[in-house]
Image (cartoon, helix red, strand yellow):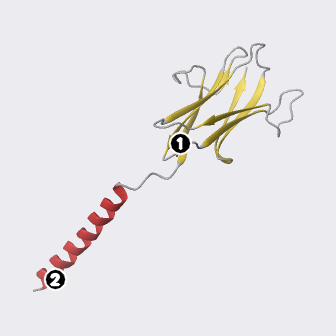
C-alpha cells in the first residue's frame, strides 16, 4: 500500500513536470541580446579589443526573441581622445530589426584613421542599453 501511494505521488510529480516543460517549449524567447564581441572583419572571425588606426571597428552580438521593427542603436565614444567628451558619443548608428536574423553587427570606419587611445561602444535595444564593449587603438 505504501509503495502504491509513493508511486502515485511520483507519477503526479512527473506529470506536472512534463506539462510544465511542454508549456514552456512553445513559449517565445524573452527578447534580448548577448555574446557581444569586437572584430576587425565583417565575418567576425578576427576577434580583438585592440585595433590599429587603419582598422574598421565591428561590434557583433546575438539576438533572440526580437520582434521585427525593434530598434537597435550603437553609440561610439572616445574615452581619452583629445577633443572628445567621453560622455558624448562621437557617432551613433541605427538599425531596425528584420525577420529571422540571429546575429547583428555594427561597423564604424574612418578613412582618415583612428586616433590612438581607448574607446567604448554601447548597444541599445529600443533605447535600453543591452551591451557594451571597450577597446583600444594602438
> How dense is the environment of label 2, judged by Cα within 10 Å: few (below 14), some, or many (20 and up)?
few
Left/right placement of residue 86 relative to residue 120 reads right
CB contact under 8 Å: marks 2 and 1: no
Q: Earlier in the sequence, mark 2 or mark 1?
A: 2
Q: Position of residue 1 (x, y in %)?
A: 9, 86
Q: Nearer the viewer, residue 51 or 87?
A: 87
Examine the rendered structure and indicate whether residue 27 appears above or below residue 125. Answer: below
> How dense is the environment of label 1, judged by Cα within 10 Å: few (below 14), some, or many (20 and up)?
few
Q: Nearer the viewer, residue 135 or 40?
A: 40
Kindly state the secondary structure of the residue where label 1 is placed. loop
Kindly state the secondary structure of the residue where label 2 is placed. helix
Q: Position of residue 49 (x, y in %)?
A: 64, 28
Residue at point 67%, 34% (across, down): 94
Left/right placement of residue 8 relative to residue 137 reads left
Residue at point 67%, 38% (across, down): 73
Examine the rendered structure and indicate whether residue 57 appears above or below residue 130. Answer: above
Left/right placement of residue 76 relative to residue 99 reads right
Indicate the quadrant where residue 36 lies. Answer: top right
Left/right placement of residue 133 relative to residue 27 reads right
Q: Quadrant of the C terminus?
A: top right
**Distance in Å between CA atoms under marks 2 and 1:** 51 Å
Q: Mark 2 highlights which residue?
A: 5
Examine the rendered structure and indicate whether residue 71 appears above or below residue 5. Answer: above
Q: Nearer the viewer, residue 6 or 62?
A: 62
Q: Position of residue 102 (x, y in %)?
A: 48, 36
Residue at point 34%, 55% (across, down): 25
Indicate the quadrant where residue 57 lies. Answer: top right
Amino acid at each position: 500500500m505504501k509503495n502504491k501511494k509513493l508511486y502515485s505521488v511520483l507519477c503526479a510529480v512527473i506529470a506536472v513536470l512534463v506539462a510544465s516543460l511542454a508549456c514552456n517549449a512553445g513559449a517565445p524567447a524573452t527578447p534580448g541580446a548577448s555574446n557581444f564581441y569586437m572584430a576587425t572583419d565583417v565575418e567576425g572571425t578576427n576577434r580583438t579589443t585592440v585595433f590599429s588606426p587603419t582598422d574598421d571597428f565591428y561590434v557583433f552580438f546575438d539576438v533572440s526573441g526580437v520582434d521585427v521593427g525593434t530598434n537597435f542603436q550603437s553609440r561610439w565614444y572616445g574615452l581619452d581622445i583629445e577633443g572628445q567628451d567621453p560622455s558624448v558619443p562621437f557617432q551613433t548608428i541605427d538599425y531596425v530589426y528584420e525577420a529571422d536574423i540571429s546575429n547583428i553587427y555594427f561597423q564604424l570606419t574612418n578613412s582618415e584613421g583612428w586616433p590612438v587611445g581607448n574607446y567604448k561602444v554601447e548597444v541599445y535595444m529600443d533605447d535600453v542599453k543591452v551591451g557594451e564593449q571597450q577597446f583600444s587603438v594602438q
